[in-house]
Amino acid sequence: MADPKKLPSVIEKHTIAVLVANEAGVLARVIGLFSGRGYNIESLTVAEVDAEKAQSRITIVTSGTTQIIEQIKAQLRRLVPVFKVSDLTIDGPAVEREMALIKVVSTGDKRVESLRIADIFRAGVVDSTNKSFVFEITGATEKINAFIKLMEPLGLKDVSRTGVVAIARGEKPL
Amino acid sequence: MKNAQMNGAEILLKALTDQGVEVVFGYPGGAVLPIYDALFQQKAIRHILVRQEGGAVHAAEGYARSTGKVGVVLVTSGPGATNAVTGLTDALMDSIPVICLTGQVPTHLIGNDAFQEADTTGITRPCTKHNYLVKDVNDLSRVVHEAFYVATTGRPGPVVIDLPKDVLQNKGIYKGAAASEEHRSYRPQVRAEADAIDQAVELIANAKRPIFYTGGGVINSGNVASKLLTEFVKLTGYPITNTLMGLGAYPGSDPQFIGMLGMHGTYEANLAMYNCDVMINVGARFDDRVTGKIAEFSPKSKKIHIDIDPSSINKNVLVDLPLVGDVATVLRQIMKRWKDGGHKTDKKALAAWWKQIALWRARDCLSYEQSKKIIKPQYALQRLQELTKHRDTYITTEVGQHQMWAAQFLKFESPRHWMTSGGLGTMGYGLPAAIGAQVAHPKALVIDVAGEASIMMNIQELSTARQYRLPVKVFILNNQYMGMVRQWQELLHGSRYSESYMESLPDFVKLAESFGGVGLRATKPEELDGVIEQMLATDNFVIADIMVDQTENVFPMIPSGAAHYDMLLGPADKAARPVSEEGMVLV
C-alpha cells in the first residue's frame, strides 16, 4: 500500500463497476449513497446481467481525490445487496463504451455533410425522413462528444446517451 | 406443527421468538393490529407500551446497549414509522443493533396515498443499515432471520422490516433460521490480515510515546473485547483514553486510564494524543468531536486503526496501518503474536512518557470551585458517583452540558453501563433509554443524568415507567438554560442568549408526582446528599431536580476548528483566544 499521507489531492475520474442483487430499491441505495454523502455521479448505467442469479451490474463514472474514491468504494461495499465493487480505472486496463442516439434535422448541404461525418465516425442511420436522421454511435465518451459537437451546426436537435458501460480487458471476470 | 399454515403476524412472532426476543417496545395502530392480536394470544414475548414511537426506539437502544442483545421495536405505518426515524438515525450513528418492525398499508394500496401511508423503506433507507419491504408472507420468516443477522454482524446497526397489513393476515409457511448464516452478498470481514498484525505488533512494541485510543467498537464487539483490551493495555503499561462511546471498555478508575479525549476531554488525554508517536485506535472512528482540527491532529504519530467497517479507514484521518476486523478477534491475533514473539516494551521511554503525562495530569483540568451557596453541576455528579459507586449502576444521559459532565465525572468500570447518544446527539434519548435498560435489568440502579431542556423532549415516557413499575431515576442538572447552546453563545456569539433560556419550565417535583412517581429537589449544596440518598432509597421512579449554577461551562474545551493543544481550561481562558472564522462555521 502506498503511503496514505502522500495520497494525491487532485481530482480524478474513475469508472466503478458494481455487481448488485437485482432487488427492489437497490439502485436507490446506490444513488442515495452518492447524493447523501456529496459524491459526484458523471454517468450511471444499470441493467440485469444474470437473470438466474438475479444480479445487476451498475457502472458509475465518478470523480474525486484518491481518498474520496477509496471512500466511495468502501461505502458501496458496505451496502448489503452489493456483491462486488471494482475500480476499472486502477484495477487494470478496461474497455469503456457509450452508445448515443442523435437526431439531426437539416436539408441540402448540411444534410449531406452530417451523413458524411457520420460515415467517418462509423455512426449508423437507424431512422430517416426527408428532413431528419437518427444516428446511432458507439464509442468512448470523447468520441461521442466530438461527434455531437460536429453535428451542432448541422441541425442537431436531440441527444440520448446511455452513459458509460465498461469491462476489464483480458480473461478475468469482475 | 411443522409447516402448518400460520398467518403473517404469527409467523413474525415465531421468528422473533426463535431469535431469542423476549421484549418488544412498541405502540399499536391500524396497520399492525394483526401483530397486536397475535401478541395478545401468546406469552413468550413481552410488549412494553411506550408513549411515543421515538421513545420506543431509544428504549430498544437502551435495552440493546445494556445487554448486548438486539432491541426490537414495533410501530404502525405512517406517523408510527416517521416518529421512529430519529431513533433509527441515532442507532445508525452509534452502531446499535435494533430491529424496527413497521406496519404498512396493504400491498394493493401502496403508492395510492392511503390513510397512514408513508414510503417507509424510502424514508428509512439512509438511516438504517438495511431495510426490507415484505410483499409475500412466504418471504417473511427468511427476511426476519436475515434482518437479525445483518443487524448484529459486522458493524451493528438498525434494520427496518416494513410489513403490509395483508402480508400479516395472509396464511403462509414458517421457515426456521438457516443453519449456515452465510449471506449471498453481505460478508463482513472479522479477521485482520496476518502481515498487518505483524506490523502492528512491531509498531506497538517499539513505541516510545504510545497511546491507546479506544471507542464504541470495543463495546460492540462484546464483553470479551473489553477484557482483552484491558489485559493488553495492562500488559504493555501504555496509557489509554476512551471516546464518549467507549467509556467503560476499560476500568475508569485504573491509573493507566487518562480520561476521555476530544472536545471536552481531559488535558492529559488530548495532549497525549497530540504528542504520541504511536496511536493504537481500537474501534473508534476519528469523529470530528475527537480530532478537532484535522490538519493538526496528532501530527507526529504512526496510526494503527482497528475497525470492522472498512469505510471508517482513511475517512477522516489517514492512517498508516489499517486492521479491518472485529475488535476481539484482532486483539486476540495481536496478543498471540505479541506473546509468541516475546515482545517487550521500551521501559525507559515509557517511564519518560508517563512522567510527561503526570505533568499534564497535574494541571487537574477538571477542577472547579464549589461554592457554599450554590450547587455546581460537577459537584452534583461527584456526589452521585460517590453515593452510587458500590452499586451496579447503569447510566444514560440526554444531550448537552450534563452529558459531558457525566462523561467527565462518573467512573465506568465495566462495559454496557453507559448509554449516551454520541453520534447523533439526540436530546430526549436518556429517559426512554433508561427505561429500556431498566426493563433488561429490573433490579439494577438505572439513572438518567438529564438536563431540564432535554428531559422535556420525551417526558411522556414517565407514563411508561409508571405502567411497568420501572424505578428509573431522572437526575436533572437544572440550570434553566439549554446549557450547551448557552455556552456556545457565550463563547462564540457575544453572550447573546438567543432562545436558549428555558421559559415556563414545569415544577418537576409536581410533574413526577402527577405521573405517579416521586419528585425531589435540591437547591443548596447541603441538601444534595440527602436528595441523592432519598432518590436511591425510593422503589419508584424519581425525578431529582437539582438546581445548579446557571452559568457554569464545560471545561476543558477545544473550540471548533482548534487543535488538541489549543484547549480552554477554564473561564479565564476564553477571552484570550477568540475562535477562528473557520471554526465558527463548524458545529
Image (spheres, helix red, strand yellow):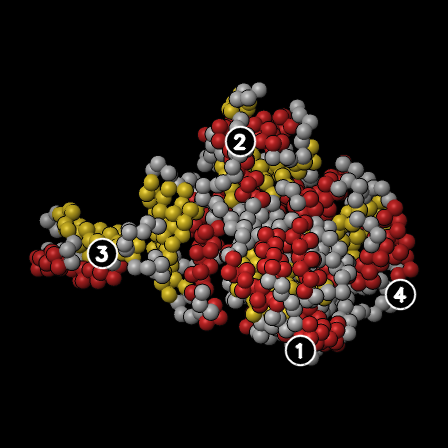
Q: Is disc 3 on the same chain as disc 4? A: no
Q: Is disc 1 on the same chain as disc 3? A: no
- Circle 3 or circle 1, nearest the eye: 3
At x 63%, y 60%, the residue is B339
Numbered disc 1: secondary structure: loop
Q: Which residue is mark 3?
A: A139
Density class for disc 2 (Cα within 10 Å; few <14, some 14-19, many ≥20) is many
Residue B225 falls left or right of residue B110: right
Q: Which residue is mark 1?
A: B577
Mark 3–mark 1 distance (CA, rounded to whole Å): 59 Å
Earlier in the chain: of badge 4 and badge 2, it is 2
Instruction: Decide which of B335, B491 is in the foreground and name it.
Output: B335
- Circle 2 or circle 1, nearest the eye: 2
The type of residue carrying mark 1 is Arg
Instruction: Decide which of A22, B561 is in the foreground and name it.
Output: A22
The type of residue carrying mark 4 is Lys
Q: Residue B373's mark?
A: 4
For the N terminus of chain B, the image quarter is top right
Q: Which residue is mark 2?
A: B141
Mark 1–mark 4 distance (CA, rounded to whole Å): 31 Å
- Asked whether the residues under the numbered discs 4 and 2 touch, taking CB atoms below 8 Å apart as contact, a structural biologist would say no
Above-or-below relation of B294 to B47? below
